[in-house]
Image (cartoon, rainbow, N blue to C red):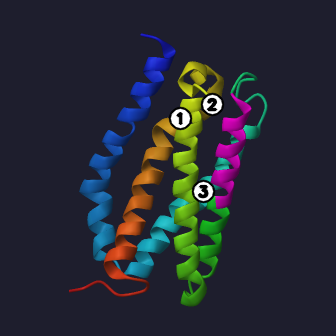
């Protein structure tokens, strides 16, 4: 089996355990929480996306990793992480918190979709070995991020901004 095929299998299967875990443990808890607290929990997870800057560190990634991918992934994650942190800092001010929740989720989804697009057009699977230590990010971390973005949008659409859980 080629490294590219292994990488593609990893990308696809990365969603399976997270969806199973999310459905069994995370989603029931998020649904039972007040909307603000559920969005706060999601923002906390995404606040760690500053870690995406590691795509720019020589020696962590290989020299032949397509540069367009590394830059887009790094700065998209960084922007999302900063916006999530700002949302967390603004939690006491709903008029600021809720727009930041929407913005960090939009930026985060655009980042992930853009990463998948660039990964496809730049043949990232063919360069998977160049990901080095960052290999785990798209395979293990990104599926959870995308799932929680979808959950955040669902909760926003279902409950509206700042509305409590219906009993």
Residue at (71, 46) in percent of width and height: 53
Q: Is residue 137 visible?
A: no
Numbered disc total: 3
- Report, in whole angstroms, how far the alpha carbon at label 3 lies from the one at label 2: 17 Å
Which quadrant of the view contains residue 86? bottom right
Residue at (26, 65) in percent of width and height: 28
Mark toward the start of the polypeptide (1 vs 3): 3
In percent of width and height, residue 142 lies at: 49, 45
What secondary structure is the stretch in magenta mostly built from? helix
Q: Can residue 157 be seen in this view?
A: yes
Residue at (31, 76) in percent of width and height: 158
Callout 3: SS = helix
In this view of the protein, which residue sits in the foreground, 15 or 124?
124
Which quadrant of the view contains residue 148? bottom left
Q: Which residue lies furthest to the front in this view?
A: 121
- Compared to residue 115, the image places residue 162 above or below, namely below
Mark 2 lies on residue: 133
- Number of other residues with Cα within 10 Å of mark 1, as a class: few under 14, some 14 to 19, many 20 or more: some
Callout 2: SS = helix
In percent of width and height, residue 122 lies at: 62, 28
Mark 1 near mark 2, Cβ–Cβ under 8 Å?
A: yes
Callout 1: SS = helix
In percent of width and height, residue 73 lies at: 64, 44
- Compared to residue 164, the image places residue 117 above or below, namely above
Mark 3 lies on residue: 48
Mark toward the start of the polypeptide (3 vs 2): 3
- Magenta span includes 35: no
Read off the magenta span: 66-79
Q: Which residue lies furthest to the right in this view?
A: 58
Mark 1 lies on residue: 136
Which quadrant of the view contains residue 104? bottom right
Screen quadrant of the C terminus: bottom left
């Amino acid at each position: 089996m080629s490294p590219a095929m292994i990488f593609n299998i990893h990308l696809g299967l990365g969603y399976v355990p997270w969806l199973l875990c999310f459905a069994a443990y995370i989603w029931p808890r998020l649904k039972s929480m007040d909307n603000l607290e559920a969005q706060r929990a999601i923002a906390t997870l995404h606040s760690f996306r500053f870690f995406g800057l590691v795509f720019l560190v020589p020696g962590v990634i290989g020299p032949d990793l397509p540069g367009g991918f590394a830059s887009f992934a790094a700065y998209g994650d960084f922007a999302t992480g900063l916006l999530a942190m700002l949302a967390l800092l603004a939690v006491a001010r709903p008029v600021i918190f809720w727009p930041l929740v929407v913005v960090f989720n939009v930026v985060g989804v655009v980042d992930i979709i853009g990463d998948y697009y660039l990964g496809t057009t730049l043949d990232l699977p063919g360069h998977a070995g160049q990901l080095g230590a960052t290999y785990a990010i798209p395979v293990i971390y990104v599926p959870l991020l995308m799932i929680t973005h979808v959950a955040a949008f669902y909760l926003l659409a279902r409950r509206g901004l700042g509305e409590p859980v219906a009993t």
